[in-house]
Amino acid sequence: MKKILLLGGSAQQVVAIETAKKLGYYTVLCDFLTDNPGQYVADKFYLVSTTDKDAVLEVAQKEKVDGVLAYASDPAAPTAAYVGEKLKLPTNPYSAVDILCNKDRFRAFLQDNGFNAPVSMGYQTIEDAMADTSRFRLPVIVKPVDSSGSKGATVLHSWDNVNDALEFAFSFSRAHRVIVEEYIEKKHPYLIGGDIFVLNGKVVIWGLLNCHRDTRVNPLVPVGKSYPLILEEADVQLVQQTLQSMMDKLEIRFGSVNVELVIDKNNRVWPIDVGPRAGGNMIPDLLGKIFGADLVEMAVQAAMGQPVLTTTHKPEGCYATHNLHSTTDGIYKQIVFSGELKKYLQEVHLYKKPGDHVERFDNAAKCLGIIFMKFPDIATAENILSHIEKHIDVQLMTE
């Protein structure tokens, strides 16, 4: 039986373990958290950090694995590529994966290869960053070089709170390094996000989605996705050309790639984040409904060097997800949906139970659950999604 090494066993990564087992593979899991749910699903579990490249390599050698997959994990993606190259397993180039997982290197790559990139600079100390503010035009965004889900990110419209923003960003950086960059204003209503899937170097699934935000908690943190993409066709083509060119230059051969981009008023495409992994918040599940494809199965097959047999159909329907969240801290009681919203609910995935502690949603890790919706048309979707806080009552008990 062939073996696959999976890096990360969180609730959102269990699906990759289950899919690999369904495909007939022996599953080996690495995760540094003792309470990860994946350990109860995998055939074998090692309490090893997915960012410890050499420790994971040792596990891979011991188990004689045939493939390695960091599903929906930015921190583990370089490790997967490192192990893949060392053991000559199917992989994307480690150098390319390392660029995509490090925000200041990614900005340098964009500049060196003719892509649009905001003025940016990486720093290892608060003092160096504070002394360099004259380099930038406001607004700017301050964030860790190595985090995802908008963890540690702040948009500044003045320099008054720059020290707080830098401390916040450093607190989320494993490498203790942050990046400051000019904030690009988009001409379209929603940031462009989602996942693309690459096979043999070519994008075969364009899972481009509208990214929704909740300005009441943090305008940078995703609170949901919707489809179809609200963007002019000419702009869609520009985005596709940009992303395919990037895959070509980085020599990305296969797998899911999570993307975030904007187009400015001068019709220039600005890549914001491009991650060599499936998106979180169940983006592959949403794309599965839209394209009729099992993107998790595709990711496993590609990581194992097997033919990707999953078929797709022409994208159709009007779908959305929403990340259930709270604007305050408290103790979880229940979530009540309006009668109007219930008409369009397809699935409800809750991560909390009554009595659990809840934190204000200032980064993606504090999500309470995810709902899937299907609408009859774009107008209905826009009507619900633009006022979704009126349709979802997150009820907390006081601590």
Image (tube, rainbow, N blue to C red):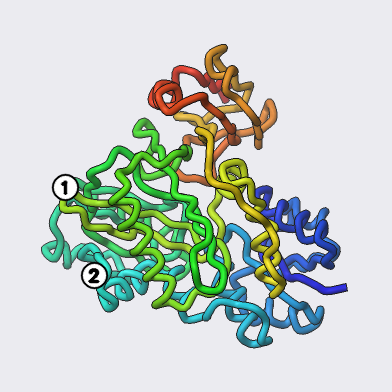
User: Which residue appears at 78% of the width and 54% of the height?
Assistant: 18
* Helix, strand or loop at mark 1: loop
Q: Is residue 321 visible?
A: no
Q: Where 187 sits versus 257, above or below?
A: above
Numbered circle sitting on residue 128: 2
The image position of residue 82, as x and y in percent, is: 59, 81
* Helix, strand or loop at mark 2: helix
Pointer 2 or 1: first along the chain: 2
Q: Nearer the viewer, residue 346 or 128?
A: 346
Which corner quadrant of the image does residue 368 belong to?
Answer: top right
The image position of residue 234, as x and y in percent, is: 28, 51
User: Which residue appears at 63% of the width and 22% of the height?
Assistant: 333
Image quadrant for the C terminus?
Answer: top right
User: Which residue appears at 68% of the width and 81% of the height?
Assistant: 57
**Which residue is tagged 1?**
158
The kind of residue on which mark 2 rests is: Asp
Q: Is residue 56 visible?
A: yes
Q: Residues within 10 Å of mark 1 (few under 14, many from 20)?
A: few
Does residue 152 appear to the left or right of 37 in the view shown? left
The image position of residue 183, as x and y in percent, is: 23, 53
Q: Where 254 sits versus 209, above or below?
A: below
The kind of residue on which mark 1 rests is: Ser
Image quadrant for the N terminus?
Answer: bottom right
Does residue 41 appear to the left or right of 147 in the view shown? right
User: Which residue appears at 69% of the width and 75% of the height?
Assistant: 305
